[in-house]
Amino acid sequence: MSDSEENVVVAVRVRPFNDREIDRNAKLIIEMPDGKSTSIRDPDAPNEEPKWFTFDYSYWSHDGFKTEKSGYTGPANSNYADQKKVFDDLGRGVLDNAWKGYNCSLFAYGQTGSGKSYSIVGTKKNKGIIPLVCEELFNRIESNKGSTEYQVTISMLEIYCERVRDLLSTKAPPKGGLKVREHPKQGFYVEDLTTVPVNSYKEIEKKVNEGTKNRTIAATNMNATSSRAHTIVKIQFVQKIPKSGGGTTTKSSEVNLVDLAGSERQKDAGSEGDRLKEGIVINKSLSTLGRVIKALHEQQSAKKKTNIQVPYRDSVLTSLLKNALGGNSKTIMIAAISPADINYEESLSTLRFADRVKSIKTKAVVNESATERMIRELKEENTRLQDLIKRNGGTGGNSEEVENLKRQLAENEKEMQKLEQTWQQRLAEEKKKRPSVSEDKSEVEKKKKDVPYLWNLNEDPALTDMIVHFIEKGNNIVGNGNVTQPQILLKGISIQPEHAIIQNSDDKTIYLIPSSGAEILVNGQQIAQTIELEQNDRILFGGNHLYVFGNPKKKGIKTSEQITYDLAQREIAKTVGIASLGMGKRSPADVILEEDLIKLFPNVHRANSMAKELKKPVKFEIVLLAPETKGLTEGMTEIYVKVHNTVDGTTFMWDKNRFMNRYYGMQEMYQNYADGDTDYNLPPERDPFYEPPDSSIILGHATMFLQSLAYMVEVDEQIPIVDWNGVDIAQLSVSLVPCSPAGKEILGEYIENPNELTKKNLGIKVKVLSAMGLPRRVDKSWCSYKFFNEDEVITNKQSGFNPTYAHEQIFTYRPVGKEFLTYLQHGVLNITVWASQKIRNKKSASSTVGSVTSRMTRLKTSSSTTDLSEQTLVKKPSKKKKVKSTKDENGKTTPKMKKKSIKSKKRSASSNPPKS
């Protein structure tokens, strides 16, 4: 056996600007002058030197390219690194090492949208490393045919929320996903993972497409965020080489090709004080990967041997990548980065991660042994395991230990069976066991030329156009399959057993007939009556199934490059007044705000849908806060999500980061529910939908001008407490008094020129005395403020609607400086009034449990938002096309898109549309 120790090979690749970055007029901050060096410049410090990094490869794919007639993106100059260049440098190395019998791993790392999947998977016209490696592997097998027998098998899995999903299995996934086990010799493996023998590139391509389609269906049905999932394609390559004296030598290689989840960090902003912050880990596997890399770096960088524990076992991903990261493997990492200044922090984080990875060493060993010896060793091992099982079982040994021994025995027997079988026997057995479960992609494309169809849109471009539903002649029921088997099966949030009927009478005229109460949007508009589908219509079924209609009998079919997920979401957002579709001139701040709203909007809608299905009595609503509503004189408008508990009668404001942290927890709870887990519900302290009434809320802000103090005149006022809706909800009694540094109040000593205070010692006494007329649902209240550059001050908590705070604080300045004097002359004291809430009488609210309606989010687009009252706010009318509204049972105005506003009657499968 030969072995070698070498560093992980690290490459960095920068992509072109995307549409989002172009809209924001993004600036280029990345340079790659020589194919190995990469620099990044801090956009907030343009005069500082850029940060430099050196890697094995630095791939410039930002510009300098041309699109050929075939659709392939090739180099227009020598600087541009195309897919072929990346494959020649990295992919061929994987193949060469696999051929020699080494285990190989290649994984892509970077934030969502940085180009990871493009490098690993690619597109139809620009194939990535996975398809090119597979294609070239079979080309080499074909050109090396002789007495050697070549065997190739493929597995494909996804890790999401620490659950392993088999993407090639034809069976329903087990509750909680597949189990990760550890074999004493082979290391970590996924129990019962499907391994499919393949005999050509066409077969392996079909399996990868099948796995990607299954991934798309699962992500849509489970309301999963695909950018949070890791995908691993595992290729086992075995060579059985005849020996001159008889028998064979087996040389094997395991190739892991890994597309990691988006590396964007969980934002702390907004989650401070959130009781669930530690409980919801957005991506445990990715955070553990960071700790594993750090530990390996420290371990291998230490001059002396240190006992640093590498936490492989702390996550599913790092367990399965243990060999790739620190064991028997030749490993490559490709780090994908954005070129834009608006992604500086994430790109810098990726470069630092890659820099740390390049110091890690692995020790790859050629996996080569006589086949007969391997079988003999497995038989001996099995005999030993059987003896241990008998011994432990007969003496009442540890049941878990016995189960582990049985699992090892089963794995060994599987391995022995593979070694004893001929390759042709395995292929024949697989064909018998696994009949074709899906149409070949070429067959689907052929059928699309004759039959009307729907194709899916997904926020992940790699998952777009992976699902095709054909609309056969007659009535095609769209539903969740809970009652009858529909022609178009859609699972997930807000999908009814019979959600709609798509009627095809002649392949030319296609009607969509919604069921009563069904959530269906066509081109962003809620529909309640039968409509004729037009070419390229965008259709949203429920909360998550987004499709495009195509009819080959008519002209003008558009592709996934022309109709994107972002376009469809912008269309939906425009209907409720939060997107302009590029109309009119907008400031950079407006562009950022609109983009964030469009991104957040579907998640808020899905949160409402999940709350309804899980019978959580909460409603979520997007609101905008201008800086003035927070007592500030400048700043950007911020997005918040209003959370209303209809049982407790409490209302809270979460900023978008806090909402998204909770949203990921909601997704996980919903996935458990959809999997049939009876323990999906969590206690209140771990429930992502629940905010306890004693959580702090901001009632409003009270603002006092300080100019009088600059003239040594005390201020004693009742000032209004203004809520985030711009409404005066109460009064706050505040007194500001000049005083000596010792605290003696200075009264009646008016000065004409504030400059007289310069270089004198002065104190300011701040008194927050009491409040009057606080809302009735307030339990306890308190105030906080910052005076000049001092630390934040918080008053005592007090009960009641007219609390007495009796707060007094002296701030001393020895002497008064110009900065402080300017603060007195032109500044304000902004006091924030906080509260906890009382729970509403349970009897009066009990009828609302389980009856929370799923609805489209209401949005008020002015600078103000909402107070503790339950008033509903809607968009002000504009000259643009209005969204029709209706009144709900409480007399509140709601958009047409709200489920309750649909007036259509339920139609049966025999319903007939107007004749064409």
Image (cartoon, rainbow, N blue to C red):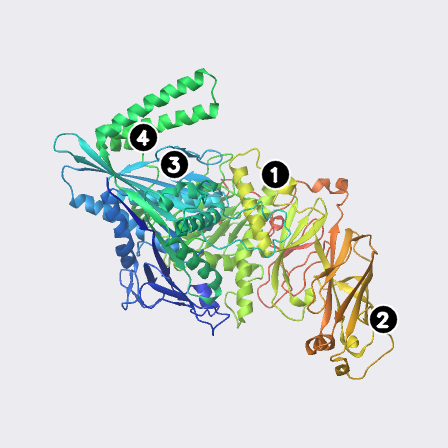
Count the numbered circles shown.
4
Q: CA distance from mark 3 to mark 2?
A: 75 Å
Residues at marks 4 and 3 touching, judged by CB atoms closer than 8 Å: no
Q: In this figure, which residue is indicated by the disc labeled 1? A: 682
Question: Could you say which is closer to the camera, residue 518 or residue 197?
Answer: 197
Question: Could you say which is closer to the camera, residue 62 or residue 200?
Answer: 62
Q: CA distance from mark 1 to mark 2?
A: 56 Å
Tell me if 467 is positioned left or right of 593 in this view. left
Report the residue at 75% width, 59% height from top.
Answer: 783
User: Which of pointers 4 and 1 lies earlier in the amino acid sequence?
Assistant: 4
Q: CA distance from mark 4 to mark 1?
A: 40 Å
Q: Quadrant of residue 369?
A: top left
Tell me if 40 is positioned left or right of 658 in this view. left
State which mark lies toward you, 3 or 2. 2
Extreme residue toward the right, this view: 748
User: Which of pointers 2 and 4 lies earlier in the amino acid sequence?
Assistant: 4
Q: In this figure, which residue is indicated by the disc labeled 4? A: 433
Q: Which mark is residue 745?
A: 2
Q: Where's residue 483, x and y in %?
A: 51, 34
- The quadrant of the image that shows the N terminus is top left
Q: Quadrant of residue 612?
A: top right
**SS at badge 2:** loop
Q: Residues within 10 Å of mark 1 (few under 14, many from 20)?
A: few
Question: Could you say which is closer to the camera, residue 300 or residue 25?
Answer: 300
Q: Which mark is residue 189?
A: 3
Residues at marks 4 and 1 touching, judged by CB atoms closer than 8 Å: no
Q: Quadrant of residue 67?
A: bottom left
User: Which of pointers 3 and 2 lies earlier in the amino acid sequence?
Assistant: 3
Residue type highlighted by circle 2:
Glu
